[in-house]
Image: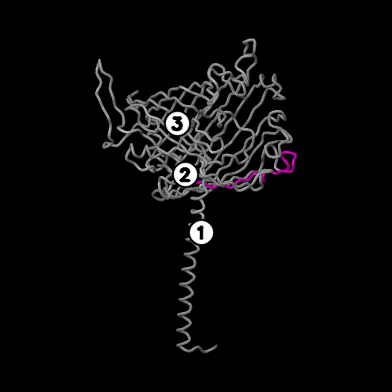
Amino acid sequence: MRYRSPMFTGIRSLQIRYWRKRRFQMKKVAIFLFISVPVLVLAFFGAVDPPKVAAVPSYARQTGLACSGCHYNPPELNPAGRRFKLTGYVDRADETKVVKSEGNKKNSALDLLSSLPLSVMLETSFTSTKSPIPTTQNGNFELPQDFSLFLSGAWTSHIGSFFQVTYDTQDDHFTSDNTDIRYANTTKLGGKEFIYGIDLNNNPTVEDLWNSTPAWGFPWVVSDFAPTPNASPLIQGGLAQDVAGLGAFAMWNNHLYIDATMYRSQHVGGPQPNPGVGSGINIRGVAPYWRVAWQQLTAKTQYEIGTYGMHVRSTPNQIVNANGVAGPEDSYTDFAFDTQIDQTLFRKDVLSFRATYIRENADLLASVAQGALTFGSHHLNTVLANASYHFGNKYSGTFGWFDTGGTVDPNLYGGTDPVTGSANGDPRGAGYIANFSYWPWQNLVLGAQYTGYTRFNGGSTNYSGSGRNASANNTVYLNARFLF
């Protein structure tokens, strides 16, 4: 055994403590850099898709509540947020200033906010795909990607709105975005609370209360140009901002929710009256949308299970021909089932699970007659599922999986484009999405998202016949949105 003097031992002990302290300090610096550098990058290069935004400051000013009072993380609504939307966006704090005049038999009433419920959103973006889109640069910045104005809040004591117009950098103009205007009132039915109302909107499912349906479903943010598979059901965004719908909704006993809406094509930016030229979907008559859901709430658990769907008859590229005849029609019937479960854990942490299955049956006689398709009868099956963990209301991580398949049709889904084409006309697409969001201040949301494809436009490898693999479209997306 080697002898060491007490002095040597003491010096050695000091050295050990010193280096332990240095390693601890270095570890803290590393952790700080690990967290702060991505956040700074996100703040500079982030972006989101405007239709996915739901938390706007005008609601906070109206209610006197922070955005987290209604959201787990925008746009995910908690039970309070769902009720706020259900009752027409009109709840407000007692001290909210209003202009009011009582009505009578000869004079109409007045009850509105003393100032307009306006909000502004600025978004920036960074998008990079695993392999560049041919002939273009990779790693693209958009500052801004979008700039939105919102008229969102109470119009009267029973009417409120979520109304958005957006400036798009790519198109270089403002355009109509998601719109949801609601009248709501409350009474009793069978001795239980009965909330009912009328809704005017421009995107099927945008009026829904849960985050398991397409308009407000995951992914919360998406790139505005990264490649995505060709095939998706019509109800999954195919009519967004292209229709106008009027419907009625009701919630009984805070459990049973029913919604029915009728839609017509409006083609924003097109001529009126609508000639239908150049539009793939021109609704004939009206297109009915339906929604039925059951929810159950406890102090720590909220779950919902339901169904929704839509039926559309369309004459593509025309309303009537030169002889005034409508001709054959395309027909789409989408029906879906969904569920959402929110479980509170560890005081304020929340674990959420959402899933939806959509089946689309299509009889596309008009498109076959126009030579656009090989077969008249088509179907698609789409499954979307995701789970989120919310660390309080500052941090949130979500992992989602998606899968679509259906009828093979080279005319509908084929093509020779190296990115958007398909060598076999197969609509199959599948993959996963991982998202991390950071909400440091409630008027600033930062996020990072990775989308990976296991199948794209019918194939995993050489799907377009040009040598491009599905994984070449894997996308890194960083985002930041600022709301005022």
Whether residue 194 is visible here, answered yes or no, is: no
Q: How many marks?
A: 3
Label 1 belongs to which residue? Answer: 34
On residue 481, the disc is 2
Residue for badge 3: 294
> In the image, is residue 232 above or below residue 400?
above
Given residues 335 and 426, the one toward you in this image is 426
In the image, 249 versus 418, the foreground residue is 418
Quadrant of the drawing holding the C terminus: top left
Name the residue located 71 percent from the left edge and 32 percent from the top edge. 414
Q: Position of residue 358 (x, y in %)?
A: 57, 31
Residue 446 visible in the snapshot: yes
Against 364, residue 344 (above or below) is below
Q: Quadrant of residue 54?
A: top left
Q: Are marks 3 and 1 in contact (CB under 8 Å)?
A: no
- Counting residues from the N terminus, which is met first, the one under dot 3 or under dot 1? 1
Q: Secondary structure at mark 2?
A: strand
Circle 3: element type? strand
Q: Nearer the viewer, mark 2 or mark 1?
A: 2
**Of the residues shown, which amino acid type is indicated by label 2?**
Arg
Tell me how far mark 2 sits from mark 3, CA to CA: 33 Å
- Dot placed on the residue nearer the N-terminal end, 2 or 3: 3
The residue at 48%/50% (across/down) is 43
Magenta segment boundaries in residue numbering: 461-480
Residue at 33% from the left image edge and 37% from the top image edge = 63
Q: Residues within 10 Å of mark 2 (few under 14, many from 20)?
A: many
The residue sitting at the front extreme is 172
Kind of residue at badge 1: Phe
CB atoms at circles 2 and 1 under 8 Å apart?
no
Given the current orientation, which residue lies at the most extreme top position? 323
Vertical comparison of 108 with 229: above or below: above
